[in-house]
Amino acid sequence: MEGVAVSLTVNGSLLAGRYRLLESVGLGGMAEVYRAEDVVLGREVAVKVFRPGWDATARPRFEAEVRTLAGLSHPGLVPVHDAGTGCDTPFLVMRLVEGRTLRDEIADGPLPAPRVRRLGAELAEALAYVHDRGVVHRDVKPSNILLDDRDKPYLADFGLAHLPGATRLTRTDQMVGTAAYLAPEQVRGADVDHPADIYALGLVLLECLTGHREYPGGEVEAAVARLHRSPAIPGHLPADLASLVSSMTATAPDQRPTAVDCARALRLDPVEETVRVPAHVAKTAAVAVPSSARVPRKALLASAAALLGAISVAWAMAPGAQPVNSAPTSSSAATTTPPSATTPVSLSPAQSTTPAEQPAAQVDDTTRAPAVPEVARQPAADRVPAVQPGAKKQKDKPQPPGKGKK
């Protein structure tokens, strides 16, 4: 009997003349997984051995699954080292992942949200790879997710995997998949495609965040429950994860995101995405400020001339200061009081550039404005010109009312 043969290999005989089965580490639908020793390479491996006693279609289906898994290679899948389908006992040799299952981790309590995002993103990427090759896992659950010593997840146990649209042959008393993680279309007996894996992964992420199964109970109770209510997502969960899990567990398959969309959403850091917008705004403002604050050269010259004029007036009006000549008084009177009988003193070109005569430059901007910059360039010793003879006589004349120094 084939069953006896498997038992003998565990007791010391070599499988395929190379693998010594040591102990059973897992039991699946049609196969059992053993820790084994590869005597050729001197390393431990995991060997999945077909279990006899099924119907006539079970072995061909197992062999088809072996060939399917042998053609898959992704960091999120357990690597396949060897396989045998022509012998009396079909088997599949894989890498032995030392660690715990995700089910063991959840038993210790809810997982932190950052860890759930990372694990979920890596699992979604593995599913995206599998889906891209037309394979549906159909049994995504915490006990089928292995974690190595670096906390890297591996999607394992493709015992129920099949191509979309293909008929899966199983025992009449066995439900295809695990009841607690079935998609609604699986419960209804409809065609199963990639969205079924997305639904199951959404329930797995929700279980990681809450620490308990969303649909507990027996197989029938757990399977039917999702037809009556959607998963209850607690309000205290992070908004991004709550929204993603809600969309992954939508009742209609066509409303669920793809595995690629799930991986992309889980890879986004909500904190970094929030900070990125203000940084962009600040960068734009920094570019706009210099252009709006640029002052024209003519405005700077005009401001400098006005400042010099103000300083000159303040100096002339200071207590104890003696006017150099009467020209400023005569010029100021022309703008503040009516003309008097006294004949105003005419100004020479040399006198029009003294600091005391700056108010006169404000009377006629078109003729005297060009002389303003020269005032700033003249040395301080040259700012007071020699007193003209006419101006000296005017100084001795009495000042008309209103023309004195204020």
Image: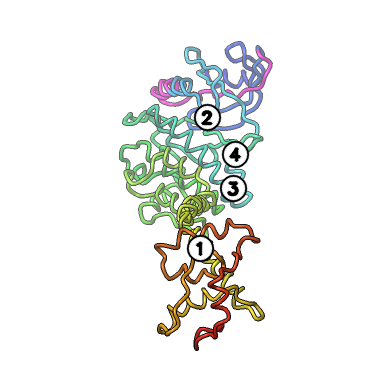
Q: Are marks 3 and 1 in contact (CB under 8 Å)?
A: no
Q: Are marks 4 and 3 in contact (CB under 8 Å)?
A: no
Disc 3 crowd rating (10 Å Cα; few below 14, some 14-19, many 20+) is some
Q: Which residue is mark 1?
A: 303
Q: CA distance from mark 2 to mark 4?
A: 14 Å
In depth, the one of 51 and 258 nearer the eye is 258
**Where residue 373 sits: x, y (%)?**
52, 58
- Looking at this view, name the residue that lies furthest to the right: 42
In depth, the one of 348 and 289 nearer the eye is 348
Disc 1 crowd rating (10 Å Cα; few below 14, some 14-19, many 20+) is few
| Residue 124 versus residue 166 in the image, above or below | below
User: Measuring 45% from the left and 34% from the top, which residue is drawn there?
Assistant: 127
Q: Is residue 63 magenta?
A: yes
Q: Are marks 2 and 1 in contact (CB under 8 Å)?
A: no
Q: CA distance from mark 2 to mark 1?
A: 75 Å
Assign a secondary structure to mark 4. Answer: strand
Q: Which residue is mark 4?
A: 101
Quadrant occupied by the C terminus: bottom right
User: Measuring 51% from the left and 27% from the top, which residue is drawn there?
Assistant: 74
User: What is the span of residues highlighted in magenta in the rendered image?
Assistant: 41-64
Q: Which mark is residue 77?
A: 2
Q: CA distance from mark 3 to mark 1?
A: 75 Å
Q: CA distance from mark 1 to mark 4?
A: 78 Å
User: Measuring 65% from the left and 31% from the top, which residue is drawn there?
Assistant: 98
Mark 4 vs 3, N-terminal side? 4
Q: Which residue is mark 3?
A: 106
- Looking at this view, name the residue that lies furthest to the bottom: 401
The residue under label 4 is which amino acid type? Thr
